[in-house]
Image (cartoon, rainbow, N blue to C red):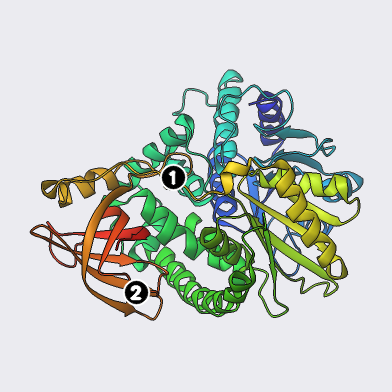
């Protein structure tokens, strides 16, 4: 990583001086795991270090001037000499300027795409900054911090800092690296797949952090057979919920906990917050249905806003709408700290680089966006409420200008069909144990079935009984309430069904094509 050596030397110098360091994170799962990796790794290497994470409502995102001021009065650490950002900082111009004015050094570790100019931090480590030749450009924030720790350990080794003692085993942090990488839905290139696979091996072997085990338990998952889906759909949402509705520090403390009972108590708090998040999201999704009803096929993008929406949930709403209409979507809510502002979260589709779109909006309409940042598939932004109509038009026009027109056709790529004998738990287990995610999707199969039974489950999902030759298979279509016809071509994923027995399987329906 470009300048990782400079950053390692800076950290090694401050460790030798016993200078206090403060890690400043982000309020999502990648940010929480990056904070935990930074704190645990730096402490194991001899640093005096603590952490601080912004509150979404009180402070906003990243290393803001308010957070710098709060850092200078940290309740446990006191005034730090060095601020270390994880999963943020590349766009924190004002916060870094404030830190410099107060005499603090700032080490930025981030993975988000930089603007044309970089903030004046002491050192910046980011695989996407100019001149960085690191081959893996898709590291999550937690991955960037992990590689910096490796560089720091090498620097300390070269200085003889370990004095014949065993060096800290940084591989013990790989369960956290795997969780953050999966949670942030970064592209699973070969490097990220290696990190996630190594982390899953630790979890399955019983060497995971107590907090990860506890979160798996409250979600009804078994750590011994943990999969990417368990990390992405069971553990990550519970940590993210704290950042959306409460305080992400609850999630960080759960990940840092050394005692399982303490971790379990925190995991249960996170589970309760996540239930609240589900209820709030369900209400907002109902309101978002109006956006779909009014959406015109000629539109290239969608901007959704309701005055009562919660700013912590709009990213989920954008994601759900994007999946339904196969268009880039920005969902907006009123900024609670400044009601004249709107805060938004966007999600995109393959072929539309969302941050590039927002950058073009900024160039075409100077001053419209007060703040923006992100990467290809997800981004955040802030604008004045009165500028919403202007943004709606500019966003649609810039998506149209940058996108390949072919990307708006919803093409479903599958791996073909399965033979009757292949619908078994062994195959489902083999698939489940591998590493799947963004850019490396799990197998999706395609077959024709007769629908012999269907009913609504929790008023939100369609449970099915399917038939093909002599097979009878249970299935579920999450988020679908419309009934299926008597026969349909279904794209599905194969899943174990432990409720029905050790050899049972069920199908998760992803796409439906009715047959006459």
Residue pushed farthest top?
Answer: 158
The total of numbered circles placed on residues is 2
- Which percent across, then down, holds residue 280? 55, 78
Residue pushed farthest left?
Answer: 470
The residue pinned by badge 1 equals: 437
* 178 lies above or below 319: above
- Which percent across, then down, holds residue 371? 81, 54
Image depth: mark 1 or mark 2 in front: 2
Alpha carbon distance from label 1 to label 2: 29 Å
- Which percent across, then down, holds residue 406? 58, 42
Q: Nearer the viewer, residue 328 or 450?
A: 450
**220 relative to 373 in the view: left or right:** left
**383 relative to 302 in the view: left or right:** right
- Which percent across, then down, holds residue 476? 30, 66
Residue drawn at (12%, 56%) of the image? 503
* 276 lies above or below 40: below
The residue pinned by badge 2 equals: 483
Residue pushed farthest front?
Answer: 516
Please rate how many residues cluster around mark 2, counting C-alpha atoms within 10 Å: few if below 14, some from 14 to 19, many from 20.
few
Is residue 44 at least partly visible in the picture? yes
Residue drawn at (37%, 56%) of the image? 230
Badge 1 or badge 2: first in the primary sequence? 1
| Quarter of the C terminus within the rendering | bottom left
Location of residue 142 by image quarter? top right
Residue drawn at (55%, 38%) of the image? 143
**161 relative to 507 in the view: left or right:** right
Please rate how many residues cluster around mark 1, counting C-alpha atoms within 10 Å: few if below 14, some from 14 to 19, many from 20.
some
């Amino acid at each position: 990583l470009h300048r990782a050596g400079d950053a390692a030397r800076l950290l090694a110098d401050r460790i030798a001086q016993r200078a206090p360091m403060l890690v400043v994170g982000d309020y999502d799962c990648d940010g929480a795991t990056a904070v935990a990796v930074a704190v645990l790794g730096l402490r194991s290497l001899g640093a005096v270090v603590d952490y601080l994470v912004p509150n979404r409502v009180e402070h906003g995102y990243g290393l803001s001037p308010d957070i710098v001021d709060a850092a200078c009065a940290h309740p446990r650490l006191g005034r730090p000499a060095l601020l270390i950002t994880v999963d943020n900082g590349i766009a924190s111009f004002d916060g870094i300027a404030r830190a410099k004015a107060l005499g603090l050094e700032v080490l930025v570790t981030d993975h988000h795409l930089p603007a044309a100019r970089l903030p004046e931090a002491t050192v910046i480590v980011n695989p996407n900054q100019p001149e960085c030749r690191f081959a893996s450009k898709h590291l999550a924030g937690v991955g960037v911090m992990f590689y910096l720790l490796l560089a720091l350990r090498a620097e300390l080794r070269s200085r003889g800092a370990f004095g014949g003692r065993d060096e800290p085993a940084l591989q013990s942090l790989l369960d956290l690296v795997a969780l953050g990488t999966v949670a942030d839905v970064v592209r699973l290139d070969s490097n990220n797949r290696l990190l996630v696979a190594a982390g899953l091996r630790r979890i399955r072997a019983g060497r995971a952090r107590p907090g990860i085990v506890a979160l798996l338990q409250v979600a009804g998952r078994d750590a011994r057979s943990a999969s990417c889906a368990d990390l992405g759909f069971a553990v990550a949402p519970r940590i993210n919920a704290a950042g959306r509705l409460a305080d992400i520090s609850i999630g960080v403390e759960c990940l840092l906990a050394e005692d399982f009972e303490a971790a379990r108590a925190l995991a249960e708090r996170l589970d309760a917050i996540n239930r609240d998040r589900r209820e709030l999201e369900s209400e907002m999704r109902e309101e978002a249905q109006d956006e779909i009803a009014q959406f015109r096929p000629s539109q290239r993008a969608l901007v959704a806003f309701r005055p009562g929406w919660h700013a912590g949930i709009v990213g989920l709403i954008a994601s759900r709408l994007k999946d339904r209409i196969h268009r880039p979507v920005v969902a907006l809510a009123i900024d609670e700290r400044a009601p004249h502002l709107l805060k938004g979260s966007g999600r995109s589709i393959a072929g539309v680089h969302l941050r590039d779109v927002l950058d073009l909006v900024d160039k075409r309409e100077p001053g419209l966006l007060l703040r923006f940042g992100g990467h290809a598939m997800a981004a955040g932004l802030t604008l004045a409420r009165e500028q919403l109509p202007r943004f709606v038009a500019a966003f649609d026009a810039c998506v149209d200008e940058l996108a390949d027109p072919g990307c708006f056709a919803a093409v479903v790529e599958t791996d073909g069909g399965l033979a009757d004998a292949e619908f078994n738990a062994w195959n489902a287990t083999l698939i489940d144990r591998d590493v799947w995610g963004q850019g490396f999707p799990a197998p999706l199969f395609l077959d024709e079935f007769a629908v012999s039974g269907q009913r609504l489950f929790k008023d939100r999902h369609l449970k099915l009984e399917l038939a093909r030759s002599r097979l009878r298979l249970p299935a579920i279509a999450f988020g679908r309430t419309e009934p299926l016809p008597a026969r349909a071509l279904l794209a599905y994923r194969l899943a174990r069904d432990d409720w029905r027995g050790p050899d049972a399987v069920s199908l998760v329906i992803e796409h439906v094509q009715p047959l006459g």
